[in-house]
Amino acid sequence: MRSVARSLVTGGAGFIGSNLARGLLAAGHAVVVVDNLSTGTRDNLADVAAEIEFVAGDVRDRDLMARLMRGVEWVFHQAALPSVPRSVADPWSSNDHNVNGTLSVLLAARDAGARRVVYAASSSVYGDTPTLPKRESMPATPLSPYAITKYVGELYCEAFHRLYGLETVALRYFNVFGPRQNPNSEYAAVIPRFIAALLRGEPPVIHGDGEQTRDFTYVDNVVAANLAAAAAPAEAVAGRVFNLGCGGRISLNRLLRELQSITGARVEPVHTAPRPGDVRDSEADISRAAEAFGYRPEVGLEEGLRRTVAWFAERLGVPATREPAAPPVAAAPDARHAWAPRPPTASVPAGEAAPRSGG
Ligand SMILES: NC(=O)c1ccc[n+]([C@@H]2O[C@H](COP(=O)([O-])OP(=O)(O)OC[C@H]3O[C@@H](n4cnc5c(N)ncnc54)[C@H](O)[C@@H]3O)[C@@H](O)[C@H]2O)c1
């Protein structure tokens, strides 16, 4: 009988982790999720709860990690406190969860003899260097406590490969979006906030002039890349860092126009002051991942946005599109009532657009 690959997803109750857990189940893995539910929710795993082993716990708990790691082949380390602004407000917590959490996962994986650790790194390590697209050979210049923590995690991954022979792969995600991304947090990313605002007919908020650009990447591409990076030959990936984006970029103003066209909700945005720590432009060169493990973003931006809008609309109990499209509505106090009444149970605030620079 063929043995089933056992995978541990840390942070598996979060946005990317819960999508990844589904991808691993679909690929036939036995999936263990550990999550302290600080930013994730059990709801994100509700429909697969019977198929996974869920452990409510903290990756910084070394005894727990040692226990969970027994028999695990693949580790997908997603647990972290995300968000640049959160880390600016509270650098200690970001460092504690992200740096100590990663070290704890790596130690447990090393000691238990796990085959490979795939680490959720971040494009924020590139900082605000003007060169585009970003290549892995460029120096890291992390600007925020969050970016520093994600970079330290990469360095630990490389060191554990060099020192102990643990196979590690760091995937630098570029602004991931898709179903199950939280639009509610004050640190929420721009796409779920825009979508939630538009679906309610509320004016989205853009920090700055809206001409800042991002390489937005649909979550299914990230899930596929994690699986491919886990399966690739060690000599192609171990101890290395890879960009994971779509290989393009779009301004927030254009992104909003795309979403207006998909939803038919023509509410105009409100612009506020730019946020400290946000980078201006971001775009990935994805050729290294393409060469090493055949990465190719299968779902493009527009299709990803359509799928995401459809998911949020179903969640909020509102139609995804409004026919016929209304003329643009100025951001006035009554603009929120332009097309859709607030659903009675929804608790999504207006879409304040923090691009969560480099995420
Ligand atoms: N979303 C993006 O655009 C993006 C971009 C770059 C990197 N990343 C990285 O991808 C990973 C997943 O991000 P996400 O967007 O899904 O965020 P998320 O907040 O939805 O998921 C993170 C999960 O980790 C859990 N967690 C946090 N600290 C923990 C701890 N100490 N022990 C156990 N669980 C803990 C949270 O409860 C949550 O479920 C993170 O490592 C993040 O830094 C995300």
Image (spheres, helix red, strand yellow):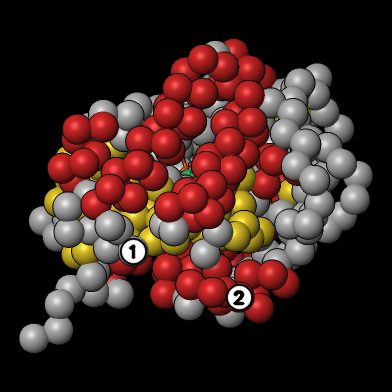
* Relative to 353, 323 lies left or right: left
The residue type indicated by label 1 comes to: Arg
The disc at residue 25 is none
Is residue 52 visible from the viewing direction of this image? yes
Residue at mark 2 to residue at mark 1: CA–CA distance: 18 Å
Ligand 1 falls in which quarter? top left
| Image coordinates for residue 245, horizontal then vertical, percent | 65, 60
Mark nearest the camera among 2 and 1 is 1
The residue under label 2 is 292
The disc at residue 115 is 1
On screen, residue 143 above or below 325: above
On screen, residue 282 above or below 262: above
Q: Which residue lies at the image location 67% right of the left edge and 64% below the top edge?
A: 246
Disc 1: residue Cβ within 8 A of ligand 1's nearest atom: no
Farthest residue, direction right: 130
Say which element carries label 1: loop
Is residue 306 visible from the viewing direction of this image? no
The residue type indicated by label 2 comes to: Ala
* Relative to 195, 204 lies left or right: right
Farthest residue, direction bottom: 1
Q: How many marks?
A: 2
Q: Which residue lies at the image location 82% right of the left edge and 28% below the top edge?
A: 208
